[in-house]
Image (cartoon, rainbow, N blue to C red):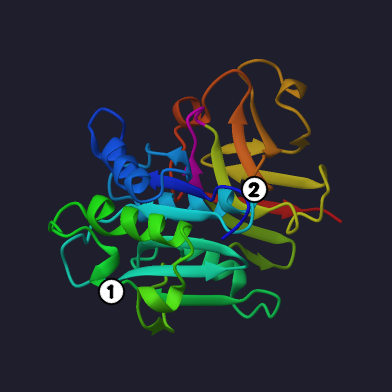
Amino acid sequence: MNDFPCIITLTTDFGTSDAYVGTMKGVILGINPNVRVVDLTHAVPPQDIHEAAFTIYSAYRYFPKGTIHTVVVDPGVGSDRQAIVCEIDGAFFVCPDNGVLGYLLQAIDGSVEHRMKAVAIQNPGYHLPEVSNTFHGRDIFAPVAAHLSRGVPLASIGPRVENLVQLPIPIPEVSGNTITGQIVKIDRFGNAITNISETVLAGEVSGYEINVQGVRLTHINRAYAESAVGEPLAIIGSFGVLEIAVNGGSAESRLGLKWGDVVEIQRFD
């Protein structure tokens, strides 16, 4: 065990108007009253595995090693889909094996500096005594996370799993001077977050023509305020990827942007 209380994060599509999240916390604290529980978000759109996968990938690296991330966006609850615990670089993920780790798995694929180990959650000794067909967040994922926080080894949870379910995660295509990506998330402010990283753009802020849904931008802002209020702009956001935004407004509503829209960039040498 560590000298400090372990951290368990919760990411769900449960919202906060019902007792689901609070019940999961009650289960966790009943097993380990010293653990710290952090709500990452409970506002993932219902059954949106892609959104959950992007969310946990974007956030996990900012937590201390040893943090246990419990991700319950689980449209297949009660079916034969596996429940798993996955360890990557000292972080633990307790979740359904439905692609919710898709961005993470894509990022570490073929990378020797990352080490991944996954087990199926099969030992009923770490479940609640009665397991419902509709609330595995309470009956399986929360108690498993809590037992892990008390030092239970992965090998006690279940057998090793080698092949995890992978989502078809969109990656940008580069052909000559053209970069083609897409919008992969609309945040609360209506900013359209793309899959085009700052690395792909080589850190330059000019020498581009960015086109999305009929909007043409020729500069990447360093701050929203570099554009007039109400004007569309491109910026490298906090996730290190290109975002399309409107200063003081919503790119989603003002420009009609949505998940999956193509973003095409022409580079000028």
Vertical position of residue 102 compared to residue 8: above or below: below
Relative to residue 252, is residue 244 drawn left or right?
A: right
In the rendered structure, which disc, 1 or 2, sits on the residue that comes first in sequence? 2
| Rendered location of residue 192, percent (x, y) | 53, 39
Crowd around label 1: few <14 · some 14–19 · many ≥20 (10 Å): few
Numbered mark located on residue 62 in the image: 2
| Rendered location of residue 91, percent (x, y) | 56, 61
Crowd around label 2: few <14 · some 14–19 · many ≥20 (10 Å): few
Residue bearing the label numbered 1 = 123
| Rendered location of residue 191, percent (x, y) | 54, 33
Q: Quadrant of residue 200?
A: bottom right
Q: Secondary structure at mark 2?
A: helix
| Rendered location of residue 5, percent (x, y) | 55, 47
* Type of amino acid under label 2: Tyr
**Magenta residues?**
184-190
Quarter of the figure that contains the N terminus: bottom right
Work out how far the residue at label 1 is from the one at label 2, CA to CA, in angstroms. 30 Å
Q: Residue at x 35, y 47 (%)?
A: 28
Relative to residue 63, is residue 187 drawn left or right?
A: left
Vertical position of residue 223 compared to residue 145: above or below: above
Quarter of the figure that contains the C terminus: bottom right
Residue 59 inside the magenta-drawn segment = no
Q: Residue at x 25, y 50 (%)?
A: 138
Q: Secondary structure at mark 1?
A: loop
Vertical position of residue 110 compared to residue 257: above or below: below
Camera-nearest residue between 211 and 105: 105
Q: Quadrant of residue 228?
A: top right
* Type of amino acid under label 1: Asn
